[in-house]
Amino acid sequence: MRYFILILFSVLLFAACEKTPTSRQTASPDAKHYPFKGKIVSVDKAKKTVTVAHEEIPNYMDAMTMAFPVKSDFVLNDLTKDADIQADLVVDTDGFWLENIAVSSAAPNANQPAPPVNENFAQVGKEISDFSLVNQDGKPTSLKDFRGKSLAITFIYSRCPLPEYCILMSKNFSDAAKQVQNSPELKDKIRLLSISFDPQTDTPQKLKEYGLGYLGKDAKPDFTVWQLGTGTDAQIKNVANYFGLQYETDASNKALINHSLVTFVIAPDGKVSKVFPGNDWTPDDLLRELEAAGK
């Protein structure tokens, strides 16, 4: 089952419940957020909306079917009829919308043959292709350097301002790295790699400073367990595409990058054993999967 969680920095608000559209790009400090679940009824790419038959939203709305706005084209391309959807419903003074969207594909039709496996993308059970980057010390690093160890790969960029996205990914990785480093049983078996998709800003030195900030001011500059990688723009695009990461510069603020979230767990033999979509996982969840991958 494919999953995607997508960050919507810029949102087209939907005119509903006698509220008028607004040009505001982000929620106000007074906006309320509600967990949202439902099934996609239809997708209107022209209007950039998705109609969802959603469950009851506790303390806000009964179950019903209605349309919600989605602005990014790459988000719309992954929304399909009958797919289950999870998101945050943002309710502000001048409208409401969905963000942080996670979608699982609809169940396959038993009467139709399974689609062919696309070897151009990383997939559970398949050995992943090698790639080369440079790490936070400016030294070459490639996937083959991690063979024989359980490896987790995620994607971040250092300028990301959102606490539930790159900041959370890096906190989870740094917390997991500390646990591994302090465990005689794990420190030689598990490795973590965060790859930046903002190579123009995230130089090796910048990533080293970034990583140390998460490891703690008193931490030794030891990146044995957790490394951070960067490369040329072409290298990063190739790696991101291979792992299904989608990202684009925000049209209204060039300092922001709209992107999906995905974390892969790779077994010591180089095969994908687990994919964590989005941000709904903890360091303990990650370590449990990494340990299982190594058995």
Image (tube, grey):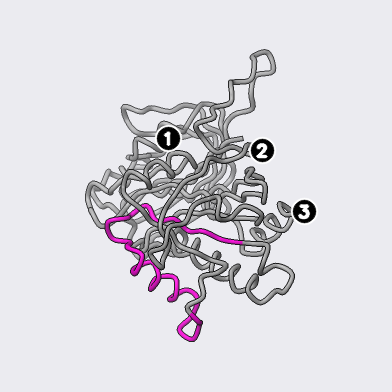
Please give the range of residues in magenta: 191-220
Label 2 or label 3, whichever comes before in sequence order: 2
Q: Residue furthest right?
A: 295
How far apart, in angstroms, are the residues tagged by discs 2 and 1?
37 Å
Amino acid beneath label 1 = Ala
The residue sitting at 40% across, 62% down in the picture is 162
Q: Crowdedness of circle 1 by 10 Å Cα count: few (<14), some, many (20+)? A: many
Residue 216: image x %, image y %? 48, 80
Magenta-drawn stretch contains 274: no
Disc 3/disc 1 C-alpha distance (Å): 46 Å
Q: Earlier along the polypeptide chain: callout 2 or callout 1?
A: 1
Q: Is residue 56 left or right of residue 200?
A: right
Does residue 12 lie above or below 141 as drawn? Answer: above
Query: Which residue corresponds to the image point at 57% horizontal and 43% vertical from the top-left?
Result: 37
Q: Nearer the viewer, mark 2 or mark 1?
A: 2
User: Looking at this view, is 99 or 73 the one in front?
Assistant: 73
Residue drawn 38% across and 58% down?
157
Residue at the disc numbered 1: 67
Name the residue that disc number 3 marks. 295
Q: How far, Cα to Cα, is label 2 from label 3?
A: 15 Å
Q: Residue at x 23, y 46 (%)?
A: 251
SS state under label 3: loop
Left or right: residue 77 versus residue 243 is left
Q: Are marks 2 and 1 in contact (CB under 8 Å)?
A: no
Question: Mark 1 or mark 3, which is nearer the start of the sequence?
Answer: 1
How far across and how far down the image is residue 3, in percent?
Answer: 55, 40
